[in-house]
Amino acid sequence: MNFKFLTIIFSLFAIAASGQSGFGVKAFVSQGFADSKIKNYVSLTPEASTPVTISQIAYKGTTASKGLGLSMYTQNSQLFLMTDALYTETGRKFQLLSTDHKGTLLDPALDFETREANLRLALTAGYVYKNMKFGVGPELTYRLETSETLSDMVEITTNDSNLLGAFNFLVGYEFLDFLHLDVKYTYGFNDVTDEFLFSGLPMDMKKNLKQLELSLGVYF
């Protein structure tokens, strides 16, 4: 495992050392996609572990995301390496569908949301064929600022989970020698309720965030 890791690191440095590099700015828009997920959460009395209510909560998806930041691109005859540091804004939507043990639906359902500003760091490396590029790589996102209404529910609290991991798959095209148009699919490792607790336990909807992104980079 250590040998493979060192081989990857060496290859990335080799690309950077042997290729042509450019710094630039990048703007993007993306849309998260995941099927709506519903989960029941049981509230317990403080005196004994007996269920008193069942809250049915639904994850309803994400809002469109947008961002802007800096990028570095290095390429030799066959391989490329791209690093991005992007400021992004995005959000998630939830609904409270029911709050009793009989599962009686609320009419209307109560809406909740999160809004967040993030710093996203991405490393993508891969293969170049003519003006096309195909790459993969890891991403790390740090939540800079978050506002949310889900914890308005008395049973829900938040933790200090501000670091998110992901892996991306990219297809891109270079034109006019300095413009890069990229399409990226990103698979997140964290649950969509990663920072929320219900009655002190992780909400854990077992639903990972996936995103499809379109970006334009200008390199100098």
Image (cartoon, helix red, strand yellow):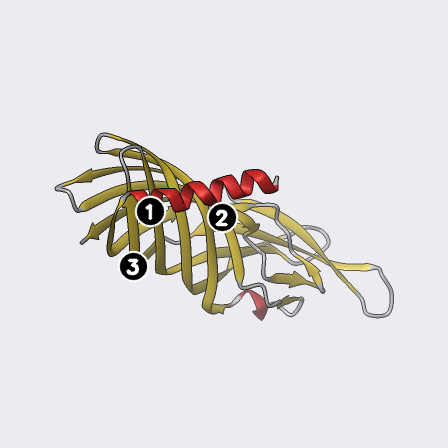
Q: Where does label 3 land, which residue?
A: 70
> From the viewer's perspective, is 16 left or right of 40?
left
Tell which of 144 and 106 is nearer to you.
144
Q: Residue at x 41, y 58 (%)?
A: 120
Q: Where does label 1 land, which residue?
A: 17
Viewer-nearest of discs 3 and 2: 3
The numbered mark, 3 or 1, whose residue comes first in the sequence reads 1
Q: Is residue 77 above or below residue 211?
A: above
Distance Cα–Cα, label 3 vs label 1: 20 Å
Total labels drawn: 3
Could you say where residue 54 lies in the image, as x and y percent from the top left? Answer: 70, 56
Q: Amino acid at mark 2?
A: Ala
Q: Is residue 140 above or below residue 158?
A: above
Specify the label residue 76 is tagged with: none
Q: Does dot 3 land on a helix, a strand or a loop?
A: strand
Q: Where does label 2 land, which residue?
A: 166
Q: Amino acid at mark 1?
A: Ala
Q: Mark 2, residues whose alpha carbon is within 10 Å: few (<14), some, or many (≥20)?
A: some
Q: Is residue 200 visible?
A: yes
> From the viewer's perspective, is 200 left or right of 186?
right
Could you say where residue 175 lies in the image, as x and y percent from the top left? Answer: 16, 39
The quadrant holding residue 99 is bottom right
Q: Does dot 2 land on a helix, a strand or a loop?
A: strand
Q: Is residue 196 above or below residue 11?
A: below
Q: Residue at x 18, y 46 (%)?
A: 179
Could you say where residue 9 lies in the image, as x and y percent from the top left? Answer: 47, 45
The quadrant holding residue 201 is bottom right
Tell which of 68 and 22 is nearer to you.
22
Distance Cα–Cα, label 3 vs label 2: 19 Å
The answer to whether mark 3 and mark 2 are in CB contact below 8 A is no
